[in-house]
Image: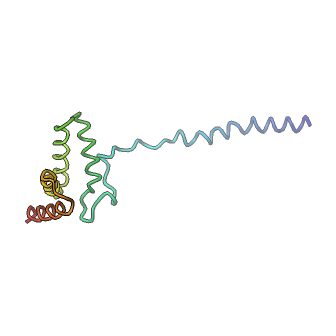
Amino acid sequence: MKIVSSLVLVLALGLTPALAQTAAAPATTAPAAAAPATTAAPVASDLTKDGKPRMKVVRAQCKDEVQGQGLKGAARKDAMAACIVKQRPDKAAAMKCRMDPQTKGMDKTARKAFVKDCVAKTKA
């Protein structure tokens, strides 16, 4: 019985440093810090069919940029709009056209038709 106990104790003490080293190895090989989303190259799913960044990505990048400037209220809104226009000028016309019927109080179907016509006129 003493021999078995001694053998278990020797094995436990002998294997503990080896097990501790293998368990700690992943912690010492930490990956490099990831780049911020604003500087990272866009992933294929973040691009539209024509290679432009998706609006979700553009809004997130512009939000980060405007937050970095510390703007609030109307200045923040204007900076967001300017940033979006800079990155996606094709969407700027639609944004502008969407604002007009909202101020006129149009219903949903009339507003959609108005925006569609407005965007078509600005592209022409």
Image coordinates for residue 108, horizontal then vertical, percent: 21, 60
Q: In which quarter of the image is the C terminus?
A: bottom left
Question: Does residue 6 lie above or below 92 as drawn?
Answer: above
Q: Which of 95 and 18 is in front in this view?
A: 95
Q: Which of 3 and 123 is in front in this view?
A: 123
Horizontal side, residue 101 vs residue 54: left or right: left
Query: What colour scheme governs how the chains and residues are painted in the rendered image of this protein?
Result: rainbow
Image coordinates for residue 43, horizontal then vertical, percent: 34, 56
Report the label total: 0
Horizontal side, residue 1 vs residue 40: left or right: right
Q: In which quarter of the image is the N terminus?
A: top right
Say which quarter of the image contains residue 50: bottom left
Question: Does residue 16 lie above or below 96 as drawn?
Answer: above
Q: Nearer the viewer, residue 123 or 68?
A: 123
Q: Outermost residue toward the right?
A: 1
Horizontal side, residue 47 vs residue 99: left or right: right
